[in-house]
Image: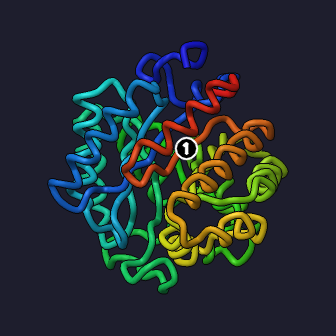
Amino acid sequence: MTDGPAPTSSRSLLEDLRHPRPCVSFEFFPPKDDAGEEVLWRTIADLEPLQPTFVSVTYGAGGTSQERTVRVTSRIAEQSRICAIGHLTLVGQSRAEIEQVLKQYASAGIHHVLALRGDPKGGPREPWEPHPGGMDHAIELVELARELGDFSIGVAAFPEGHPDAGGRDPDADVLVAKHRAGAEFAITQFFFRVQDYVDLVERTRARGSDLPIVPGIMPILNFGQVARMAELSGAEIPREVLDVIEPVADDKDAVRTRGIELATQLCRDLLAAGAPGLHFITLNRSKATREIFQTLRSEGLV
């Protein structure tokens, strides 16, 4: 990406996302144990030469693994040249506890955070219950991060609408409200239909918001795993995707090959539609992401 944006350390992330050259970023899951953490560090080492605009490490389900997430994100910021974005959720935390996490990020030199409500502890389909001393909506977290420090704040976006929003239009209203509260960019939940992304951007722009919205990409490498994640999150695997994957569902290698092909084409279509970048949900493995990236780079797209 030598012709792309300068490293984020020397310019703001918002400038990078508005640069004509698309950004590329990677998302990691928090490792469950020390062995998993070593796998993650190898993945980060493999991906660092691709010069990502930023990387992020999520919380575990229901807000778990927060301590490890903060520690790993801080280590990325301190020991690599990669810009690290700190995840924040409201799940199971008081306002004071969230303030402490923000202070930890700031002390580690992390100046970008992703402010999320997060999924309920019982899973995405369970009713939302705020912590007694906490907050109820992501917009409150945006406001808190803006109040406490000089953070560049990102938020979640949902091409198919958040399950709790009551429809795609109300969901767009929420996204625009988060922008007006201080969010500078958004990253979407993974999805498989480019039109869903295009429609989300159009709904946002129709409401007067120019918020950069980065599409989240998760290639189908393990059909059962992705199908479970999609069901839990409310994302739809459309028929045109199932028609490609289902005939080879019992052949792991064929699923992987077709999943990478589908994800690569989705990336091409999104960039053609004007997406400011691509955010790869890596599942803590680098090979598929590198393959997609290298194909797009060979075509002059990233």
The quarter holding residue 10 reads top left
Q: Is residue 180 visible?
A: no
Q: Quadrant of the N terminus?
A: top right
In the image: residue 195, left or right of residue 225: right
Q: Residue at x 51, y 71 (%)?
A: 229
Q: Residue at x 59, y 71 (%)?
A: 249
Residue under circle 1? Answer: 279
The quarter holding residue 46 reads top left
The quarter holding residue 129 reads bottom left
Q: Position of residue 188 (x, y in %)?
A: 60, 54
What amino acid is at disc 1? Answer: His
- In the image, is residue 140 above or below residue 62? above
Q: Residue at x 37, y 50 (%)?
A: 284
Label 1 sits on a secondary structure element that is strand
Q: Nearer the viewer, residue 3 or 179?
A: 3
Q: Residue at x 57, y 77 (%)?
A: 231
